[in-house]
């Protein structure tokens, strides 16, 4: 809900230099991120995979990290692999490196950064996308929450971001104009007024946003930018599978359940967005020569899409956080979701 109208400090909209697919015109390069080196953590699936692909498609050389490989799955137990992500980046016209890294382990992160340094001597874009959602136990009070699982959530969803930034920012600040994107859940405004279901989840997601705020202050003197970005209701592989729908069937299934409180998927799922909307916004942000205007700020996939004149794969622009605010004053059945898409 950090929109231009509600928050005057948010960067004013401008005539966008690029659009969703970065079309080539006589006034702009076809690959605006050509020559840039990017590191995307948690790139095995979901938002991280889409972001890596979008950055590569815009010309960046992308280091994609994850723990799930063709040889072994992580404890998420998902079939997606980091090698597959690298293949998608290559297919989009980018250069990709599949890196198996556990970002809870300092020595593995340090070794990765040293490899990037040896190969390029620079890092231009860091996207910290590891979320830890697989370890969430919703609506469980702190004193009943399994401590090992809670710490697993906090370490995976926040500590990975902190450790990776600590290891990588020394390389990133060697060149002016570096960008750090912290992917979280909820805008700063929304999270300041809402408890996010459990203490461990609440602290994890708000800490990620605060990390962007804090590192942005330290990067400023190096002409760097740090920003936290949240998607809306993300239609990830895990979410689609959990609701028993596909990218082709989710919308009809959700809309058919209007007025049915226990239906799966719920009617509210019709507000969801694909990972591409977030990815397109971040690629546009990275290509923006005036991206420093976003430094230390919290924004959303919707706000980036509106600012850079982007849409999701279906041509819509879901405003999830405004929709969430509407749910506080009226039942979901009375809301026309198309008014928020």
Image (cartoon, rainbow, N blue to C red):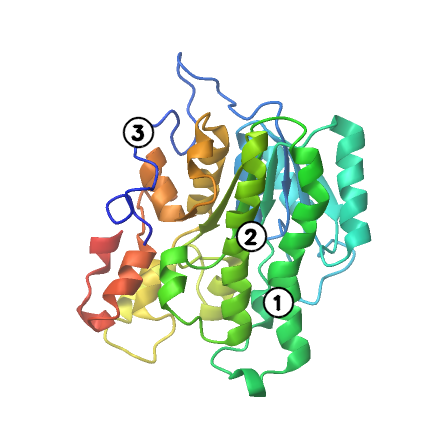
Q: Residues within 10 Å of mark 3 (few under 14, many from 20)?
A: few
| Helix, strand or loop under label 2 | helix
Q: Which residue is mark 1?
A: 154
Sequence-wise, the earlier of marks 2 and 3 is: 3
Classify 261 as above or below 266: below
Tell me the quarter of the image containing the N terminus.
bottom left
Tell me how far mark 2 sits from mark 3, CA to CA. 28 Å
Q: CA distance from mark 1 to mark 2?
A: 14 Å
Residue pictured at 38% horizontal, 74% vertical: 264
* Residue occupying the far bottom of the picture: 144
Residue 289 appears in the figure: yes
- The residue that mark 2 highlights is 211
CA gap, disc 1 to disc 3?
Answer: 37 Å
Q: Secondary structure at mark 1?
A: helix
Q: From the viewer's perspective, tell me whether residue 321 is left or right of residue 196.
A: left
> How crowded is the residue under tag 1: few (<14 C-alpha within 10 Å), some, or many (20+)?
many
Q: How many marks?
A: 3
Residue 78 location, quadrant? bottom right
SS for callout 3: loop
Q: Nearer the viewer, residue 230 or 274?
A: 230
* Labelled pair 1, 2 in contact (Cβ < 8 Å): no
Q: Residue at x 28, y 43 (%)?
A: 8
Residue toward you, 248 or 146: 146
Q: Earlier in the sequence, mark 1 or mark 2?
A: 1
* CB atoms of marks 2 and 3 within 8 Å: no
Quarter occupied by residue 321: bottom left
Which numbered tag is attached to residue 14?
3
Q: Is residue 24 left or right of residue 55?
A: left
């Amino acid at each position: 809900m950090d929109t231009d109208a509600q928050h005057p400090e948010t960067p004013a909209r401008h005539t966008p230099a690029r659009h969703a697919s970065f079309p080539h015109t006589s006034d702009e390069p076809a690959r605006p991120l050509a020559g840039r080196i990017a590191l995307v953590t948690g790139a095995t699936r979901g938002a991280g995979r889409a972001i890596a692909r979008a950055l590569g498609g815009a010309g960046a050389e992308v280091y994609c990290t994850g723990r799930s490989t063709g040889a072994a799955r992580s404890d998420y137990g998902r079939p997606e692999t980091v090698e597959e992500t690298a293949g998608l980046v290559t297919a989009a016209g980018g250069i990709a490196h599949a890196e198996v890294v556990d970002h809870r382990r300092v020595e593995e992160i340090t070794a990765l950064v040293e490899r990037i340094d040896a190969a390029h001597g620079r890092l231009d874009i860091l996207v910290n996308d590891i979320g830890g959602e697989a370890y969430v136990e919703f609506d469980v009070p702190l004193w009943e929450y399994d401590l090992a699982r809670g710490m697993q959530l906090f370490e995976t969803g926040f500590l990975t971001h902190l450790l990776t930034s600590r290891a990588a920012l020394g390389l990133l600040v060697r060149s002016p104009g570096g960008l750090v994107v912290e992917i979280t859940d909820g805008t700063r405004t929304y999270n300041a007024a809402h408890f996010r279901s459990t203490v461990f989840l609440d602290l994890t997601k708000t800490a990620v946003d605060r990390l962007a705020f804090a590192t942005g202050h330290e990067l400023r003197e190096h002409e760097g930018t740090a920003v936290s970005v949240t998607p809306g209701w993300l239609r990830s592989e895990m979410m689609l599978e959990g609701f028993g729908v596909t990218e082709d069937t989710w919308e009809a299934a959700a809309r058919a359940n209007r007025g049915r409180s226990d239906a799966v998927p719920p009617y509210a799922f019709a507000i969801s967005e694909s990972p591409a909307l977030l990815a397109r916004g971040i690629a546009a942000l990275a290509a923006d020569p005036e991206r420093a205007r976003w430094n230390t700020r919290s924004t959303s996939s919707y706000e980036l899409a509106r600012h850079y004149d982007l849409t999701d794969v279906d041509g819509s622009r879901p405003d999830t956080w405004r929709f969430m605010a509407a749910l506080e004053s009226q039942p979901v059945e009375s809301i026309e979701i198309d008014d928020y898409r």
